[in-house]
Amino acid sequence: MGDILEHFTADIKENVRYIENLFEDDCILRKREFSFGGSSACLFYFDGMVNVELINESVLKPLGRVEKIDGKLTIADFTARTLFASEIKVTSLVKDGVSAMLYGDTLLLLENSRLAITVNSKGWRTRGISEPQNERVLEGPREGFDEAAMFNVAMIRRRLQTPDFACEMTRMGRATNTVVFICYLKSLVNRATLRELKKQLDNIDIDGVLDSNYLTEQITRGGALFRKVGSTERPDVVAARLLEGRVAVVVDTTPMVITLPYLFSENFQSDEDYYISPLLASAGRFMRMLCFVLSVSVSAIYLALTTHHFDFLPSEFALTVSVARSGVPFPSVFECLILTLIFEILRETGIRMPQNVGHALSIVGGLVVGQSAVEARLVSAPMLIAVAFSGICGLMVPRLSSAVFFLRFGTIIASAVFGLFGILCLSAMTLIHLLSVDSFGTDATSALRNPSAEGLKDVPVRVSWRKMFTRPPIQSRNVKRKK
Amino acid sequence: MKFRIITVILFCLLLCGCSYTEPDSRYTVTAMGFDRRDGKVTAVLRVIDATKGEQGGSPATFTLTASGKNLREASEKLSESLSKKPSFGHCGLLVFSENCDVEFLNDALSLCEENRISKRARITVCNNVLPLLSYEGLATAEDFVGIIDSAGKKYGVGQHSAFFEIETALLLGEDFALPRFSLSDKVSFSGLLTFEKGQPHRNLNLKEGAEYLKNGRDNL
C-alpha cells in the first residue's frame, strides 16, 4: 500500500485506486462504476453488509435518471439532493468514508469532487428478536437483544420514550472498530459515574472488542470474586436499570449489555421479580440468598462435622456416616473435592451441549455414574448427597456462579484443615472483601452498610410498587421514584 | 501480605488444632463403665466399629476392658489398647459399680469431662459393670435409657441420672439417687442406689424406690 490518503482528491481515478489498494485482499468489496449527467462516479460497498435493493432504489436509479447536472450546485450537493436515501453524509475525510463503509454504508466517489458521499445502506442479516435462553421468565416481556447494537438501542428507546434518554456512540478496538453506545437518562444519571466510565473506556487500547466482557474486564479494577458490572440480554431490564439512574453500555456484535454501577443485592434478584406478586418475589429472593449460603457451605460443613467435629453429629447420623464411609479408599477431603469437580464438569458440559444431549448427560452423569460410584464404594452416599445438594443450590444464583465456584473449593479446603473454625474464618474474610467492593463509586453493599427503610424496600425483599417511593441507593441524582 | 496470611493460618491452627480424622477411622464409644474391686479399678468401653459388621446390616459392637491401680491408669491402658481414635461424644451411658463412693464418682466424672463425654450421658449403677456393657441385646445407650424411661413412666422413678445433674449434685454435696440395673435374669431396671453424705446409702428395689420418690426421704 502506498502513501496514506487523508482527504479525497479531485481525481476520481486516484480515489478509486486508493480504496481498491486499501482492500486489495478483501474479496467481498464490491465496486460499481457508472456515470450520470455526463459525470462518472463509483460506489463501493461490502457484499453481505448492505441492502443491495436499497442501493439500487436509492442511489443507482435516481442518479441514472439524471440527464444534466445543475450547474449552480457542486456535484456533491447535487448528488446528495438527488439520492433517495434516508441518511446520507458528505465527507472529505477518507477515514470517515472508509469507516462508514465498514459499518455497512455505501461510499460514493464523484468525478471532480474532493467530497465523497456515504449512504446508509446497512442490511446485514441479524439473528432477530428472540427470548434470551439464559434469562427466561414465565411472566413479563420475552424480547431479548441480538447482535446488532443499533437495533438493541432501538429496543431500549422503545421502552424509554423520552427526550431524557441519551445515547452516545464511540468506537473501540483498533482492528474491530466496534461500535459502542453509552446510554443513560440525563436527569437521573450520576455524572461522576458517567465521567469515570468514559475515562475508563478512553484508556482502553486494544486491537479488538468482540464482546462486552472485553470492556467489562478492563473497566473494573480489583478482585473478580464478585461482579462489579451487571450484564443482561433483556431490554426491559436495561430500561429498568436506566430508570434507577444507571448507565448501560451496548456493544455491537454481542447481545450482552453492560449496566453499572452494580449492587451485590442484584445477584439475588430475578428479572421476573417485578412482574409477579411482591410476596412471591420476596420469597424467591430469600431462597436465592439461602441457596447461595448453602451452595458455598453445605459440603464444607459436612466435611468439617464428619472429620473434625464428629461428636457434634447426632449418634444415629454419625453411625450412618461411618458405615457409609467404610470401604471408601479415598480420604473424605479428596472425595469431596473430586465430587465437586465432577459436578462442575457435568454442569459445564450440560450447558455447552445441545438441550437433548444435555438431558441425557444429566441422567448418565447424575444417576448412572453417581449410583455406580456409590455401589462400587468409590464414594460414600452421604458425601455424594451433600455435594449434589450444594451444587443444585448453586444453580439458583447463576450470577454468582464464579464466586460460588471459588468459595466452594475454598471452604472445602479450609474445613479440611481447620474444621468449622476455618469455614468461619473464610466467611469473615469473604464478608470483609465483599464490604469493600466498589462499583464505579457506589458501595456494592451500600444497602447493608447504611440500612434504611426506603433503601431496603428492594433489597432483601421486593415491596409493592405502591410503596416503592425511591430508587435503589446508587447515588442517583433524583432519588424519588414516585410521589 | 504474606506475613499476614501466614499469621492467620498459624492462628487458626493454634485455635483449632489438627484434629482431622476420617469417620471410619474412629471407634464410636456408646457406653463407658467403671468398676472398683479388690483395690483395682477396671474401665470398660462399649464401642461400635463402623467398618465391620454385616453388609447392609448393623455395624459391629464390642467391649474393651483395662485394669489399673487407679482410674487414670486403667483409662490410659484402655486408650493404648485401641487401634483407632475413640470418639466419646456419642457416649450416652456411664455405668458405675454399686460400691463406688462419691469421691470415686467425682474422679470418674472429671476423667469423662477430659475426654469430652457428652453432658447428655445417663449415669446408672449395677452390681457388675462388664457383663452389663457386654450384653449383646443392648447395643447403645438409648437401649438403657429406654428401659429407665419406661420404668420412670410406670413408677415415677429414673430421675436425676444425667451426667450434668450428678456432677452438680456432687459439687453441691447433695444427696442423690442413681438408677440401678440388675443382671439376674436379663438386663433390667431394678431400682435405685441412693447416695447420702458421700457414700452409697442403700439399694432400693423398684417398689421401694417408687415409694421413696413419692413420699420423700423423711417418710421412708
Image (cartoon, helix red, strand yellow):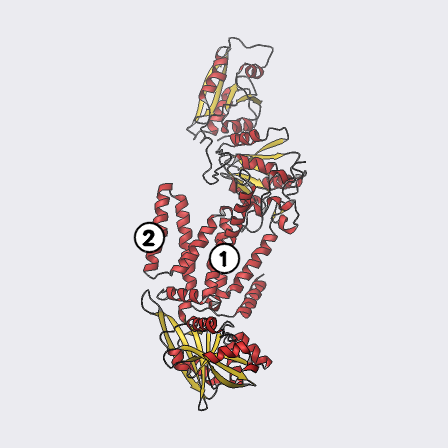
| Percent x, y of residue B96 | 46, 81
Marks 1 and 2 share the same chain = yes
Task: Indicate the amino acid at tag 2.
Answer: Val
- Label 1 lies in what chain? A
Q: Height in image: A103 above or below A69?
A: below
Task: Indicate the amino acid at tag 1.
Answer: Ser
Label number found at residue A148: none
| Percent x, y of residue A133 | 45, 39
Front-most of residues A24 and A250: A250
Label number found at residue A297: 1
Secondary structure at numbered mark 1: helix
Residue for point 58% across, 37% down: A240
Front-most of residues B66 and B93: B93
Task: Quickly name the residue at label 2.
Answer: A368
* B27 horizontally vs A288: left or right: left
Front-most of residues B202 and A338: B202
| Percent x, y of residue A57 | 47, 16
| Percent x, y of residue A293 | 52, 54
Q: Height in image: A252 above or below B193?
A: above
Residue for point 43% across, 64% down: A317
Q: Height in image: B115 above or below A57?
A: below
